[in-house]
Amino acid sequence: QVQLVEYGGGFVQAGGSLRLSCVASGGTISTKAMGWFRQVLGKEREFVAAVRWDHGVTAYADSVKGRFAVSRDNAKNTVYLQMNSLKSEDTATYYCCFGRVLQTTPVYGAYEYWGQGTQVTVSS
């Protein structure tokens, strides 16, 4: 059983930056990928970014490429999402997730464990 706890959400003006953190515990973390999804009330949860825990290879949704950066700190069992040039459409609840497989993938069903979510609100 893997536990995930997110930190770092909040309120920011458009053009600003936030960094989300997700601390993982309780599983063999180094053999899987970890990802970030986001969800707006009434809409489906959508893929944002993912990182392979071993090589650090990353993947991004087109909507955040060039603005967001995902990374991991093996020693701290922590994955980060650095969000820059934030837009009002980035407003959502952001969820950290732990994959069933090692490969980065945007597929919701490929992730087995989820954090509780952290709210990000971007004002225009």
Image (tube, rainbow, N blue to C red):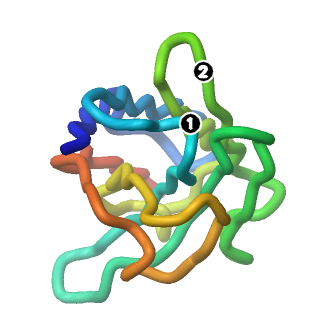
The image quadrant where one finds the N terminus is top left
Q: Secondary structure at mark 1?
A: helix
Q: Which one is in front, 43 or 109?
A: 109
Residue 102 position within the rendered picture, expressed as x and y whole percent measured from the top left: 61, 59
Residue 30 is marked as 1
Q: Height in image: 70 above or below 72?
A: below
Density class for disc 2 (Cα within 10 Å; few <14, some 14-19, many ≥20) is few
Q: Residue at coordinates 55% horizontally, 33% vertically from top-left?
A: 80
Q: Which one is in front, 14 or 3?
A: 3
Q: What residue did someone put label 2 on?
A: 74
Residue 85 is marked as none
Q: Residue at coordinates 25% horizontally, 30% vertically from top-left?
A: 26
Q: Which one is in front, 52 or 7?
A: 52
Q: Height in image: 43 above or below 96?
A: below
Residue 67 position within the rendered picture, expressed as x and y whole percent measured from the top left: 74, 52
Q: Height in image: 53 above or below 40?
A: above
Q: Residue at coordinates 78% horizontally, 63% vertically from top-left?
A: 65
* Res 41 → quadrant: bottom left
- Numbered marks: total: 2
- The residue sitting at the bottom extreme is 43
The kind of residue tagged 1 is Ser
First of labels 1, 2 by sequence position? 1
Q: Are marks 1 and 2 in contact (CB under 8 Å)?
A: yes
Of the two numbered discs 1 and 2 in the rendering, the one whose residue sits closer to the viewer: 1
Density class for disc 1 (Cα within 10 Å; few <14, some 14-19, many ≥20) is some
Q: Height in image: 110 above or below 28?
A: below
Residue 17 position within the rendered picture, expressed as x and y whole percent measured from the top left: 59, 35
